[in-house]
Amino acid sequence: MNKSRVFLYLMLAIPIGLMVIPTMIVLMFALLPSGVAFIMERGKGIYGGVCVGAMNLAGASPYLVDLWFEGHTVEAAFGILTDVFAILVIYGCAAFGWAIYATTPSVVSTFMTMTAGRRIAALQDQQKELVLKWGPDVESVYEQEDKKED
């Protein structure tokens, strides 16, 4: 990258950065649970971080909108961060994201088990109908390899 481009990027980034300082102050403290979630999920994927991050950002968004439309100042940003109710809502939404992430696998597993059980019962009913229609010669019993006795 040549020096003129770096200079151009700095000339654009510095004013934009100065304009969004109050937003960045709020987001830096509000999105701490999201950062923790991404760090904890480092080797397992990003689903925990995305789930917590989305809920965390949803909890912070009403306060960001207030900040943007009612005075975008550093004092207003610190006012949001010192409001106990605001922090409770922001971090409570992040906790709800953790709860969603923690309970979703068991809910999906239960649903899959119920669906598979219904499918097995339907196939057994079809098998009985085929045996009645074609005779006992079409009936076979499937045994899994790990359950076979040698």
Image (cartoon, rainbow, N blue to C red):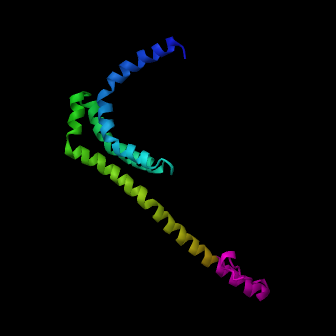
At x 27%, y 31%, the residue is 69
**Residue 146, x across and y down, in percent:** 66, 76
Height in image: 113 above or below 147?
above
| Residue 90 colored in magenta in the image | no
Front residue of 107/62: it is: 107
Which residue lies most toward the top here? 4
**Residue 44, x across and y down, in percent:** 50, 51
Give the quarter of the image for residue 67. top left
Q: Is residue 12 visible?
A: yes
Q: Is residue 17 left or right of residue 7?
A: left
Q: Is residue 31 left or right of residue 82?
A: right
Height in image: 4 above or below 56?
above
At x 33%, y 40%, the residue is 61
Give the quarter of the image for residue 102. bottom left
Q: Which residues are magenta?
A: 123-150
At x 69%, y 75%, the residue is 145
At x 24%, y 31%, the residue is 70
**Residue 82, x across and y down, in percent:** 20, 39
Height in image: 129 above or below 80?
below
Q: Is residue 127 left or right of residue 103?
A: right
